Image: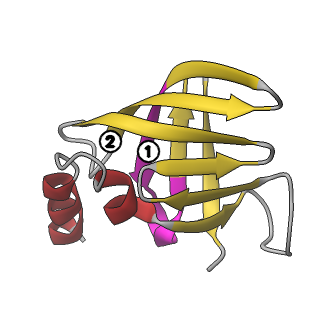
């Protein structure tokens, strides 16, 4: 397991590849049961939520955090645009952990 995280951490320094290498796929907060407003899809340098999407740029490997990568995110949804910092990391059992200012969300892998 340590080798896997070390390999992911090494890949995290490559712009545009970090998100794809860490956790590409479809994720759900609860049970994987079709279309839901609790889903997130990570593909390359884009993460999509219900009615919003964020382009992830300027990846920075977070040392000693098992492959965690901090991004600048430019998000759009419902006719608005906003920026934020977003940390993504692979959790146990293939889960996706997303940390934003003030909260963290863990998603289970659905695909």
Q: What secondary structure is found at the residue carrying circle 1?
A: strand
Q: Which residue is mark 1?
A: 88
- Residue 66 as seen in the image, left or right of residue 57: left
Residue 89 inside the magenta-drawn segment: yes
Judging depth in this view, the residue of 111 and 106 nearest the camera is 111
Q: What secondary structure is found at the residue carrying circle 2?
A: strand
Q: What residue span does the magenta drawing correspond to?
A: 85-96
Question: Where is residue 19, by image quadrant?
Answer: bottom left
Q: Residue at x 41, y 50 (%)?
A: 89
The spot of residue 94 in percent (x, y) is 48, 70
Measure the alpha-carbon separation of dots 2 and 1.
Answer: 5 Å
Q: Quadrant of the N terminus?
A: bottom left
Q: Look at the picture and state if 65 lies above or below 99.
A: below
The spot of residue 13 in percent (x, y) is 17, 46
Residue 69 numbered tag: 2
**Cβ–Cβ below 8 Å for labels 2 and 1?**
yes
Residue 103 inside the magenta-drawn segment: no
- Residue 3 as seen in the image, left or right of residue 74: left
The spot of residue 106 in percent (x, y) is 61, 51
Judging depth in this view, the residue of 40 and 75 nearest the camera is 75
Residue extending farthest front: 79
Instruction: Residue 101: tell me if it is visible.
Output: no
Q: Residue at x 74, y 22 (%)?
A: 80
């Amino acid at each position: 397991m340590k080798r896997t995280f070390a390999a992911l951490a090494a890949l995290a320094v490559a712009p545009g590849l970090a998100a794809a290498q860490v956790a590409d796929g479809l994720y759900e907060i609860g049970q994987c049961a079709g279309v839901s407003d609790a889903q997130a899809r990570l593909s390359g340098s884009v993460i999509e939520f219900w009615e919003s999407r964020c382009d992830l740029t300027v990846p920075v490997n977070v040392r000693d955090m098992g492959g965690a990568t901090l991004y600048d995110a430019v998000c759009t949804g419902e006719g608005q645009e906003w920026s934020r910092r977003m940390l993504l990391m692979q959790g146990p059992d293939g889960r996706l952990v997303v940390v934003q200012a003030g909260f963290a969300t863990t998603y289970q892998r659905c695909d």
